[in-house]
Amino acid sequence: MEESDRLDELKDRMRSVGYVCDDRIAMALLLAGELGKPILAEGPAGVGKTELSRAYSKAFGMPLVRLQCYEGLDEAKALYEWNYKKQLLRIQADSSGRSWNEMEDDLFGEDFLLPRPLLKAIRNTEKVVLLVDEVDKADVEFEAFLLEILSDFAVSIPELGTITANNIPFVVLTSNRTRELSEALRRRCLYLYLDFPDAEREMEIISILVPDVALTLSRKLVAVVRQIRTMDLKKVPSIAETVDWARAVVVLGRDSIDEELLISTLSLLVKEQKDLERVMASTQSLARQASWTQP
């Protein structure tokens, strides 16, 4: 199959689950799958980095395993833990008088293992999508550990031996760039920078996810949101919030954007009080922006 045909097929699959890919995103997904390389998706919050992995898992029928990163995340929470409570109950229930050495093999077996996301992705009998979300929030030490896992997809558990992945997961790491990631991790990945889409692509997303919205109204909605994103806000509206606003306008049965509608529905777009006050002060100009937008 020609490269262009493969890209078109991939874009069609992603579009069928509500994710609109341009050629650049489609090529990154195609190469990541063919080369077995993780994707490092960076960009502002709300541009669809997390949704990229969710959509890919739906489009290709692969289970999604998610590891949400945060400060203080360690190997135990990401890889595996032993179920100490269950082990204790097993010891208490044992009435045979066996020694510790005799019981140890029983206590550190599969029945007492608590697999966390990384081990789940490795042990899964079918290929999965592994989402490592907001990796920039994790500590540098955890990043080094993650790099080791991504290098060979094998885990050594002292009591059970080495577990190697039967199928290399399709890996997506996301970052909001709250800190710089190591060069070693970047070299390991296929880099993809995601930003807010242009107006036409955002309208296409709305048309897929909110099919009842008219094209003229969609154009006005997107024009207002794009204007809000130019303001100095702590958190600008995400693509998902644009979609939510479009759904709300359709539910309300409105076919135009005026100041009254903006004021009553603005909380769907802006989720910080100071941001809300700033945008609220500009509702007149935003309504004019909507009225000036060409049908």
Image (spheres, rainbow, N blue to C red):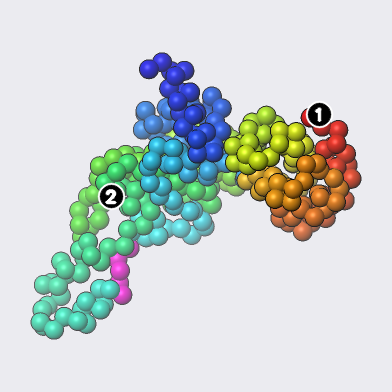
Question: Which residue lies at the image location 20% right of the left edge and 53% below the top edge?
Answer: 161
Residue 101 on image: x %, y %: 13, 72
Between 135 and 165, the one nearer to me in the picture: 165
Q: Is residue 177 above or below residue 24?
A: below
Residue at image point 67% right, 34% down: 203
Q: Which residue type does callout 1 highlight?
A: Gln
Whether residue 106 sits left or right of residue 217 in the image: it is left
Q: Quadrant of residue 176?
A: top right
Quarter of the picture holding the C terminus: top right
149 or 112: nearer the viewer:
112
Disc ID at residue 123: 2
- Relative to 56, is 248 above or below? below
* Residue segment shown in magenta: 81-85
Q: Which residue is denoted by mark 1 in the rendering?
A: 294
Q: Check the picture and name the quadrant holding the N terminus.
A: top left
Amino acid on which the number 2 mark rests in the picture = Arg
Q: Give the side of residue 172 with respect to residue 175, left or right.
A: left
The number of numbered badges drawn on the structure is: 2
Q: CA distance from mark 1 to mark 2?
A: 54 Å
Dot 2 alpha-carbon crowd within 10 angstroms: few under 14, some 14 to 19, many 20 or more: some
For the point 29% across and 48% down, which residue is it?
Answer: 124
Q: Residue 81, how many percent across, how many down?
A: 33, 63
Q: Position of residue 68 (x, y in %)?
A: 48, 53
Kindly report which numbered mark, 1 or 2, lies closer to the viewer in this rendering.
1
Q: Residue at x 10, y 82 (%)?
A: 96
Asked if residue 27 shows in the view, the reply is yes
Q: Position of residue 55 (x, y in %)?
A: 48, 40
Picture quadrant where residue 111 is located: bottom left
